[in-house]
Amino acid sequence: MPVLLEDLKSLEYRGYDTAGIVYLENGKLVKYRSQGKLTNLENLIGDEIPASSHIGLCLSRSLALEILDH
């Protein structure tokens, strides 16, 4: 799952206010989401993502989208 964090890091230059990761563990979806910088999400997750998890996705919400919505 570290690849998901790397993907989010590659998009960080665009600016976003929310980021999250969802992955499958023992047939259940596990979700982590945080606001602000990606380091907030990394701190929230810590070492909790199991290395055995092979299915997951990451998401971000752009600051630009927030501005356009108003």
Image (cartoon, rainbow, N blue to C red):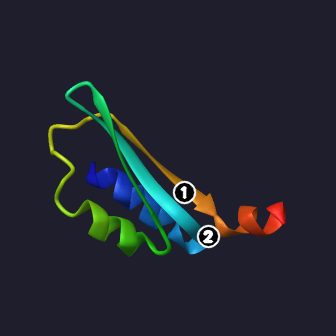
Q: Residue at x 38, y 72 (%)?
A: 40
Residue depicted at x 60% and y 59%: 61
Q: Amino acid at mark 1?
A: Ser
- Report the residue marked by disc 2: 14
Q: Which residue is mark 1?
A: 60
Residues at marks 1 and 2 touching, judged by CB atoms closer than 8 Å: yes
**Total tally of numbered discs in the picture:** 2
- Quarter of the image for residue 53 reads top left
Q: Is residue 24 left or right of residue 22?
A: left
> Residue 39 placed where, x, y %?
36, 74
Nearer the observer, 20 or 9: 20
**Image position, residue 21 (x, y; %):** 39, 50
Q: Residues within 10 Å of mark 1 (few under 14, many from 20)?
A: some
At x 19%, y 28%, the residue is 26
State the quadrant of the C terminus: bottom right
Position in image of residue 28 (x %, y %): 29, 29
Taking the image as shown, residue 1 lies to the left or right of residue 37, namely left
- Residue 6 lies in what quarter of the image? bottom left
Q: Is residue 34 above or below residue 39?
A: above
